[in-house]
Image: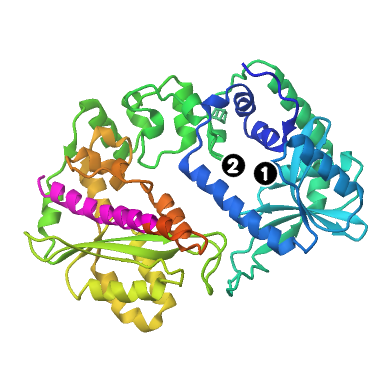
Amino acid sequence: MNRRPQFLSKSKLMSARQCPKRLYLEIHRPDLVRFSAAAEFAFAVGDSVGEVARDIYGSADSELIPYAGGLGHALRKSRRLISEGPRFPIFEATLQHDGVLVRIDALLPYRDRWQIVEVKASTTTKEDHLYDCAIQCWVFRGLGYPLQECALAHVDNRFVYEGSGDYNGLLIEEDITEEVDRMADLVPAWVSDARKVARGREPDIDVGTQCFSPHECPFVSHCWPMDTEFPLLNLGGGVRKDKLAALVADGVSDVRDIPAQDLNDRQRRIQKVCRDGKAELLPAAADFVASLEFPRYYLDFETIMPAVPVFAGTRPYETLPVQWSCHYEADRDSLDHAEFLDLSGDPPMRRLAESLIRALGHSGPVLTYSPYEERMINGLIERFPDLAEALRGILKRLTDLLPIVRENYYHPAMQGSWSIKAVLPTIGSDLDYKKLEEIQDGTQASAAYLEAINPATPAPRKAELKKRLLDYCRQDTLAMVHVLRFLATA
Ligand code: SF4
């Protein structure tokens, strides 16, 4: 067991607010931390917004306090710069008061006082942001420094990037001084409670909705019952987490043991298949396949949704298609492939749309595996009205395979998911996402695309990323071909 840490960081205090057990485990069992891919992605998004914030708020004489030189150095340098008075922006000022450690995103001169600016990648102010800022202000004021205002800077999703690296306007500032002041008296109690948890025994806390809100806790796989063949968390079928937590409290840990009255129709199907231990494939699946004429097209987009826009004319978090793959069968015995990927760094959406129109011809079903492609094509229609007629023609031919698979197929190994990555290993396909190098899901594909178009990426790395992106997207549409052929066997 680890010793009690010298400081409680702001993030530890925030963990304690989510769940005291989370704080305890972070301190004493860091080996159990398992961040989901979505959480890792959210950290990276936060970093990208933080970097731009330093450009927006910075000036020629700004100081960024490096952490690499060690905590002592960061604390000393921060103290010295702040003590010299508000003269220029300081980023990542590192301060401790009464054993609480904070790093302040931006500390800006405000006449003869300071303004604290906390930068968030979200598009609104959330309750936990206020707690976060209250802790920072408590430390800052506790050290005797003059604070004029505390502001939260979050992403303004109405901002339109005009290019040339000009991100002024990306962040919108909200003065939260009053809210934070109202919380100031509460901070010492939070600190004292957290200290008790840090020093004490592991808190006995039941799993609940707090495990997923405001952030997914990295100890979910530790606290939730997972050592069973069909863990409750993998029930799927749109189950609410509070319902699952109530079942755990009743001693249920496996999908097969859930009382029938607690399940909806889809979940009852899942439970039956888990209990039977064998897959269910309904005859209607084959009828659906037989109804599809040739040529058949199988389409998948890869997209990006950067918090910090990369293409002029786009907004933060706007979903932009940047790549497509299409397998097509002219008849029962043929299979061909076409694809689009442009890593020049220029906005690819126009060329993507034109190449798609050319590749998809004029007739035949265009199969997708989610309603996502429909949304993307509607976005292209809005962006390029002159292509609207041709794109609307494609929209009319879209056929989403996902609801067909969901209604007609389930295998116990799918563990509550009908994603193509969950279905594929259960249908005897030789395709395996785990064999793909580096890019095995859409989030990784998005990150790879953004890395590839970055002018600082060396050419050999760019070539490597290009191959991996093409391999990944091609596999997505080939997987759909395999799924359709499997459904035909029903
Ligand atoms: S998984 Fe849930 S119960 Fe466990 S530490 Fe996290 S929030 Fe607390």
Which circle's residue, 2 or 1, is located before the other in the chain?
Answer: 1
Q: x, y (%) of residue 127?
A: 68, 46
Q: x, y (%) of residue 48?
A: 59, 55
Left or right placement of residue 299 versus residue 58 in this view: left
Rendered image coloring scheme: rainbow
Q: Which residues are magenta?
A: 464-490
Left or right placement of residue 17 versus residue 89 in this view: left
Residue picked out by circle 1: 128
Q: Which mark is residue 21?
A: none
Q: Name the quarter showing ligand 1.
A: top right
Left or right placement of residue 458 versus residue 101 in this view: left
At mark 2, the secondary structure is: loop
Tell me the quarter of the image containing the N terminus: top right
Evaluate whether residue 84 shows in this view. yes
State how far apart marks 2 and 1 are (Cα).
8 Å
Density class for disc 2 (Cα within 10 Å; few <14, some 14-19, many ≥20) is few
Q: Which mark is residue 214?
A: 2
* Residue at the extreme left: 333
Tell me the quarter of the image containing the C terminus: top left
Is residue 259 rendered magenta in the image? Answer: no
Prevalent SS, magenta region = helix
Residue type of the residue flagged with mark 2 = Pro
